[in-house]
Image (spheres, grey):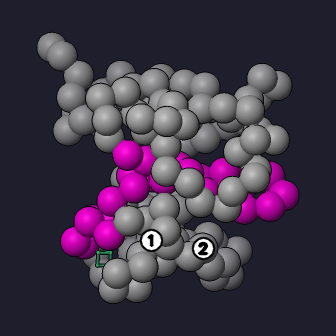
Amino acid sequence: MAKSPQNLDSDLQWHLIGGVEELKQKVCRKVYMQGGQGLALFYVAPDKFFLTNSTCPHARGPLEQGDIEDIGGSFKVVCPLHYYSFDLVTGQSATGLTLRTYKTEVREDGLYGLTPFPVSLTR
Ligand code: FES
């Protein structure tokens, strides 16, 4: 069966996103899964990266333009459209909506994301 963006929980694999030092240059950026789906990559100094879908589950706000808040040691992105916030690890929000999140891992050769498709910095 062909993979599709709707079939996100199957066939997750670690994919190299880019060099860690380059990715530390921006707090929020949009990256792209093969097939065109946008993801939001967040960096919180000194060494935390978070990867989520780039569209807000409420009304498709651009989460890569959101602010990051540290609420009791738990990092959340605040959507710029209606200010709902989503936990960057679990994707949960007080609204009951859940944002799709992906695990990340820093390795010797760069940052990896556990995603169903390869990820690149450009479309
Ligand atoms: S679109 Fe994100 S909170 Fe409404």
Question: Three-letter amino acid code at disc 1?
Answer: Phe
| Outermost residue, left side | 1
**Figure quadrant of residue 16:** top right
Question: To which residue does mark 2 refer?
Answer: 68
Q: Residue at x 84, y 58 (%)?
A: 46
Can residue 12 be seen at all in this image of the molecule? Answer: no
**Figure quadrant of residue 118:** top left
Indicate the position of residue 71 as horizontal and vertical percent values.
Answer: 63, 82
Q: Residue at x 15, y 14 (%)?
A: 1
- Frontmost residue, 61 versus 97: 61
Q: CA distance from mark 1 to mark 2?
A: 10 Å
Crowding at mark 2 (Cα within 10 Å: few <14, some 14-19, many 20+): many
> Dots 1 and 2: beta carbons under 8 Å?
no
| Outermost residue, bottom side | 82
Q: Which residues are magenta?
A: 38-61
- SS category of the residue bearing label 1: strand
Say above or below: 116 vs 41.
above
- SS category of the residue bearing label 2: strand
**Figure quadrant of residue 33:** top left
* Ligand 1 within 8 angstroms of badge 1 C-beta: no
Question: Three-letter amino acid code at disc 2?
Answer: Ile
Ligand 1 quadrant?
A: bottom left
Can residue 45 be seen at all in this image of the molecule? Answer: yes
Indicate the position of residue 90 as horizontal and vertical percent values.
Answer: 47, 59
Q: Residue at x 60, y 32 (%)?
A: 17
Q: Residue at x 26, y 66 (%)?
A: 60
Q: Closer to the N terminus: mark 1 or mark 2?
A: 2
Question: To which residue does mark 1 refer?
Answer: 86
Q: Is residue 111 magenta?
A: no
Q: Is residue 51 magenta?
A: yes
